[in-house]
Image (cartoon, coloured by chain):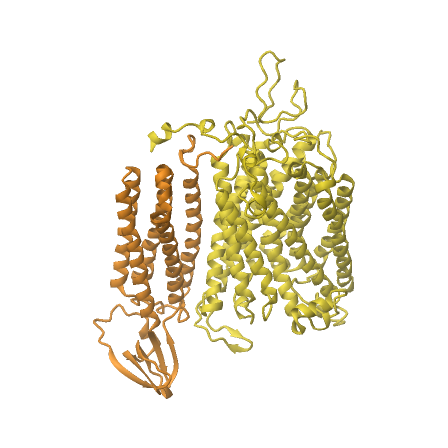
Chain colours: A orange, B yellow
Amino acid sequence: MEIPYVIQPRPDTGIYNAKVGIWLFLASEVMLFGALFSAYVLLRVGAVPGEWPHGWQNLTLGTINTLVLAVSAITTLLAWVACKTRQFGKFKFFHGCTLLLALAFLCIKSEEYREHLTHYEIQLTDGRIAEGDMRENNSQNDYVLIDGRYVAEEKDLYDLRAQKDPKPEEIKIPRAQIKEMQNYGPWHNDYLALYFTLTGLHALHVLGGSIVIGYLWGPGRRLWQTDPEHFTNRVEVSGLFWHFVDLVWIFLFPVLYLM
Amino acid sequence: MDETVHSFPAYDEVPGDHGHGHAAHHDPGFWRGYVFSTDHKVIGIQYGFTALCFLLFGFFLILLMRWQIAHPGVPVPFIGPLLEKILGPTMAGHGAISPDLYNSFGAMHGTIMIFLGVVPLAFAAFGNYVVPLMIGAPDMAFPRVNMASYQAYVLGGIVMLVSFFIPGGAAQAGWTSYSPLATTIPTHGQAFWIIGMVLLITSSLLGAVNFIATIIQLRAPGMTWMRLPFFVWAQFVTAFLLLLAFPPLEAAALMQLMDNLAHTSFFLPTGLAVGGHLAHVSGGGSPLLWQHLFWFLGHPEVYVLILPAMGIVCEIIANNTRKPIWGYKSLVYSVLAIGFLSFIVWAHHMYLTGMGTKIATFFQATTLAISIPSVIILTCLLISLWGASIRFNTPMLFCLAFLPMFGIGGLTGLPLGLAPADIYLHDTYYVIAHFHYVVAPGTIFALFAGIYYWFPKMTGRRMNEFWGRVHFWASFVFMNVVFMPMFAQGMEGMLRRMADGGANYSAARVPGALDTLPNTIMEMHTWILWGAVALGLAQIPFIINLFWSLNHGEEAHSDNPWNSTTLEWQTPTPPPHGNFATPPQIHRGPYEYSVPGHDTDFTPQNEPEIPVTAPKISPMPAMH
């Protein structure tokens, strides 16, 4: 006996095996991200009032990335439609676009990470706090150079939404005056920890989805010659995963960038 | 999509190979046949063998711990020098178990027994071997995913084992890995634990998707939902629990990994002090968050351990009472109810955390509610025995012992479900005794029963009946010698996870102090130790029997030596690749034993309807 319903749907359930599989897998993914979003809610509700960061993200890049993923959802759908209508050239074109968009998303995300990781909070021995982008941090020199500003208190760092056109100035701080210096990595506070963990896990999903789509676009396309229906199913299943990854971002963007 | 549905042929018209042709066409060779096999039966046996090895190893860890509890600080006889050689003098100086080593053995005993032993054996091994056969499928829906699942499991096991040998040793924060403890212990064992767990979670995710898809899609024609054997239902619900409950633990594990390696503060509160100093962390995290996420898995996990066991017991009881299971529908609806309720009881592990009486009340209510379907299942199985002429073979003995043993485990859980009683009993040996009664003489007995029962299908030979009985009676007696005293110890207030077994709080150490542990309670450690040693010896007949019977056991002489109705016995023995010679057609429910008017006392599910010329038979009531 051979395994049935690999390609054709089972009459009473109406779907083929892999589609059942991917929906179950996505249910599990919902629980995974759901748990992380609950962690976000619990930590944010439990935070000291007024100390939850706002406006720490580069909204321009975030918005561009949202659009990039939204367009990639459309090209994914069109790639599947192309398979259904047996137009292989169109499939190659649309999923080529999907792959480029995925690459663009990951590049923009890396740039955002770079911005955070080169942004520093520096506590001075006289009680002042400096924050800004690191320009020069050479251990040979006895100073560090940042583009930023001084604030009087820690709490002035949390809400940056009201800041109108902050003109960073170049600040030179002697190392002797530095009490503590830390960049805006996940270790900096819970908000950044959540930001890096959630978007990092999401980026891994984008990467994983790209690998699968890249496989179908590249070496996996041989199946098209022998069994186009089976190939179309694979495109559909990988497309379902891709839409889920997009959907997660649709939740991540407001939660981390806007709220 | 509708037109595509109708334009494709139905199941039995699917272009098939020539029956179970694969094995006949080409010999897959050793590597493809036994190591990288995609055949569900081979994978089931791989899972079973690996899981049994892990069970033995986990048992070995607890033997060492029981020695330490009974004789704190005394070098372990025989293997003490070996321990010192392997793990170094800081962990096992002079062959005695240090408190750090005790803690890591404790954490790893729990982890190994649950995630590497019982779940892979109960769910993955039996599920893989038996479920596709029972539903009349040629294999699992995704054979290669199935293989990947086993490989991820082995990899996770290796990561866990390797962590014993890194500097600082394996994880020491208990199998529950509570933060901030898990982050502040100076060993990378916890990171190994987390990575191992992520691999095991991946494995169970792949397995769960596969099982559910298989049961939904690959049921043979005529195998309707209410004709599924109860074991399949139990595995179906178990798979959903694994699918939906494990990911939150994965999320928690990722966050704890970030805490440990990237120095985030997901679970580390502001003002955390470690070793008397303020820890250098950003703070703001919530230790309660870890507990919620952990127990969101942790409690459904309990049912992952017990539901497959109930399924096995149900099959064997039906077979050996030679009559239909009493209340098949009640069993099915109960197992579904358990599956649902098990997601909303988790915080009964957290009454002591100060989460508030209102929340505690909610979880007390759901916890007591979930005992109802559990009791229904047990009652159905018990009533099934009524008026039967029972065949007392080894599998049946284990199943009969399962009923009262699981009963003890379940009923002693009720006080723990109520906050006022739990606040006293929390983290005592009472809890240890309670859940071990559920898992050890409960689930593990059912697993033994399953091995004795399905062994003839896997090999064509029976296991030796006499040594099976020796194994049963010795295990039965010594399980109780080991676990029964722990109820008394716990009620006297002896806490778990103490490397000196409570000697510090004993009346002998501090005479005259209030509420010390009396000598009678402390002496029980010695009984338990020797009970555990004897329990270990009792497994020797089983191990020898298992391997000896492979080649020398009494031949089964039949594909269906137990005269069973379910489909797995209606195949060649052992089932070839592809399982069934011809696609089976299912005509009736799973437990049609002793149907009046039938020639034999069993009617297999795939036996065609009796022609109208035969004497009219009265249909079994309530079997659909």
Image quadrant where one finds the C terminus of chain B: top right
Vertical side of A29 occupied by B574: above or below = above
Q: Position of residue B189 (x, y in %)?
A: 56, 66
Q: Would you say B478 lies left or right of B346 here? A: right
**Which residue is pictured at 46% across the width and 61% down the height?**
B254
Q: Position of residue B123 (x, y in %)?
A: 57, 45
Most foreground residue, A64 or A151: A64
Image quadrant where residue B470 sits: top right
Image quadrant where residue B54 sits: bottom right
Q: Position of residue B166 (x, y in %)?
A: 58, 68
Vertical side of B541 occupied by B563: above or below = above
Most foreground residue, B168 or B496: B168
**One can see residue B90 in this view:** yes
Image quadrant where one finds the N terminus of chain B: top left
Q: Position of residue A43 (x, y in %)?
A: 42, 63
**Which residue is pictured at 54% across the width and 66% down the height?**
B182
Q: Would you say B299 lies left or right of A52 here? A: right
**One can see residue B343 in this view:** no
Q: Would you say B117 lies left or right of B465 here? A: left
Q: Would you say B293 lies left or right of B566 here? A: left
Most foreground residue, B72 or B505: B72
